[in-house]
Image (tube, grey):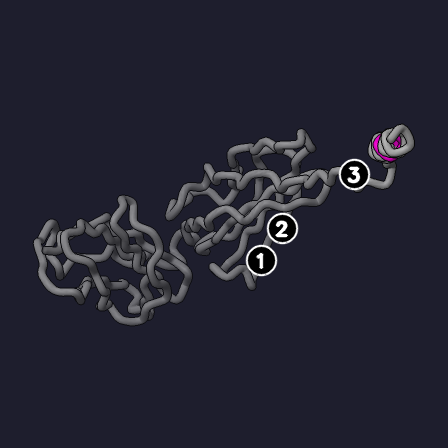
Amino acid sequence: MKRIVFYIALVGLGLLTSCSGDDNRPSLITINEAPGVPALIFPINNLICTSVDLEFSWNGVMDNEGDSVRYVIDIARDSDFNNIVFTVTTAGTSSAFTLEKGIRYYWRLRAIDSEDNASSYSPTQSFFTEPEAGTNTIPTAPQLISPMQGERISGSTITLDWNATDSEDDALSYDLYLGDTNPPVLFSDNINVSTFDVTVSPGTVYYWRVVIKDTQQSAAIGQVWNFRTE
């Protein structure tokens, strides 16, 4: 019996020694997270800028691990950013650019930490620069045809209808902003007719506006209209 007890004691001691001296256990892996997504401040969405010398600004973000953060700003002539005119990296929360007159621009931003972890892009915003004086006239602001302001409408499909003119008879295209929040968000762009069918839900207040663009890149932003579905 003494031998059995002694053997058990030795086995137990061996297990304790093995556990306390195990240097082959995998070490904990720390994942470095990307910084947050910065929020755009200026130029605000759909702003018509009277100057081409603009200082872009945005909210700075914190990095969970305390890494330094830099920002990459893209400015383009199209919403898909295939025609980027500026890409700049800066550690600050603002950057100045000289742009061209009579252009609609789009801009976005993302943050990158010192470990090269990048955030998602911010939501894209667009703005306009006024054209050279005397070279082109901005189209007229859109006029509401239907549905009338504040009208109650039934049905699952609504036809939005508006009218706009251009004093130089330039061909016009339209960007439609639509949603159940005010201001509405971009719903469809580069529409070449002044009507648009949309599917709606019952019991909802919808807000919408139209931006008119001519072939000279001039634009007019319409006011926000609304209607209610039954």
**Magenta span contains residue 10:** yes
Q: Earlier in the sequence, mark 3 or mark 1?
A: 3
Residue 16: quarter of image:
top right
* Label annotation for residue 34: none
- Dot 1: few (<14), some (14–19), or many (≥20) neighbours within 10 Å? some
Q: Which element carries disc 3, helix, strand or loop? A: loop
- 177 and 204: which is toward the camera: 204
Q: Name the dominant secondary structure of the magenta segment.
A: helix
Is residue 129 visible in the rendered structure shown here? Answer: no
- At x 34%, y 63%, the residue is 188
Give the residue at mark 3. Answer: 27
Q: x%, y% of residue 78?
A: 49, 61
From which residue to which does the magenta span run? 9-13
* Label annotation for residue 84: 1
Q: Amino acid at mark 3?
A: Ser
Quadrant, the N terminus:
top right
In front: label 3 or label 1: 3
- 89 and 197: which is toward the camera: 197
Quadrant, the C terminus:
bottom left
Q: x%, y% of residue 141?
A: 24, 54
Residue 151 placement, left or right of 132: left
- Dot 2: few (<14), some (14–19), or many (≥20) neighbours within 10 Å? few
**Magenta span contains residue 138:** no
Q: Amino acid at mark 2?
A: Thr
Is residue 167 visible in the rendered structure shown here? Answer: yes
Label 2 with label 1: CB-CB less than 8 Å? yes
* Label annotation for residue 87: 2
Relative to residue 54, is residue 137 depicted above or below? below
